[in-house]
Amino acid sequence: MVDNRVNPTSNMKLLLYNQVDGRCPFCGKNLHYVKNQIQTLFEVAHIYPANPKSYESELLKDVPRLSEDVNSIENLIVVCRDCHKKFDHPRTTEDYYRWYDLKKDLMLNDKAKSAFFDNNVNEEIIKVMDALLKIECESDLAQLRLSALKLDEKINSENSFIFKKKIRDQVVDYYLMVRDQFKELDTISPYQFEKIATQVKGCYLTLIETNENQEEVFSMLVVWLNEKTGKISKPACEIIISFFIQNCEVFS
């Protein structure tokens, strides 16, 4: 019988190890230990078997696959020895779908991470953040009229009430102030707002392509903006992303 298994390269193992952040994605066990030097404990598992037995071929005949090539990185995942053994013996469709879904999520997360590096933001946005951080009391803010809000048209109904309320409160309290700060930027250096809005929109489109969950996309946009602005203030980043939701660059 021909063995279809191909040993993954060192680079593939490193990518797979980093993809799960060095822990078994099923039980959370560390996949390395230190004894003089770092020693690995993981095994590289095939999600769809490299050499399926006849009963496995029948069992998995209708399941979706992440790749037709059983040795491609899309069909591989690193796990601890115990979870690997449990997965293989006995093989079940329930376990297959669980591993398939988890690997799919890991791949989507990889694409989201790439958005952090591939999408930049104009440093002028830091001036808007600085203005937010200088607010001392509510009287410094002019609230947006509730009649001007259109968030219900943009935020999906399946999102949690907490998430929707957070966005609504931030828009009501800060939208006009953030808008005025962007206008001030444009009077000093024209088209700064348009540049920043385009950059935020670009990152949003990259993320929404791989993940349609609005709460998760919002969180990733906040992390992205926080990273790109030197981690000055995560709350200020939330306010700015909420501004762009109301302004239609995000969730439109």
Image: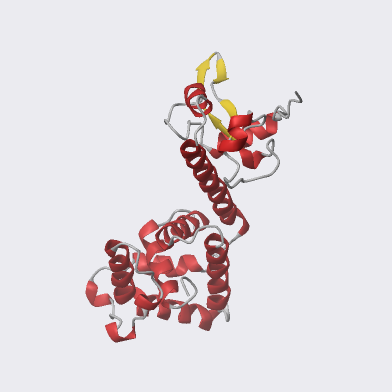
Q: Percent from the top left, x then y, of residue 141?
A: 28, 77
Q: Which of 37 and 187 is in front in this view?
A: 37
Q: Percent from the top left, x then y, of residue 59?
A: 56, 37
Find the residue positioned furthest to the right.
Answer: 2
Q: How many marks?
A: 0
Q: Percent from the top left, x then y, of residue 205?
A: 56, 66
Q: Percent from the top left, x then y, of residue 14?
A: 63, 32
Q: Seen in the image, is 216 located left or right of residue 103?
A: left
> Measuring 56% from the left and 76% from the top, which residue is drawn there?
192
Q: Which of 237 and 245 is in front in this view?
A: 245
Can residue 145 be seen in this snapshot? no
Q: Which of 38 and 19 is in front in this view?
A: 19
Find the residue positioned furthest to the top.
Answer: 36
Q: Seen in the image, is 45 located left or right of residue 176?
A: right
Can residue 40 be seen in this snapshot? yes
Q: In which quarter of the image is the N terminus?
A: top right
Using the image, determine if residue 186 lies above or below residue 204: below
Dividing the picture into quadrants, the one containing residue 77 is top right
Q: Seen in the image, is 8 located left or right of residue 61?
A: right
> Measuring 27% from the left and 76% from the top, which residue is drawn there?
140
> Measuring 53% from the left and 77% from the top, which residue is drawn there?
193
> Measuring 50% from the left and 58% from the top, which residue is drawn there?
211
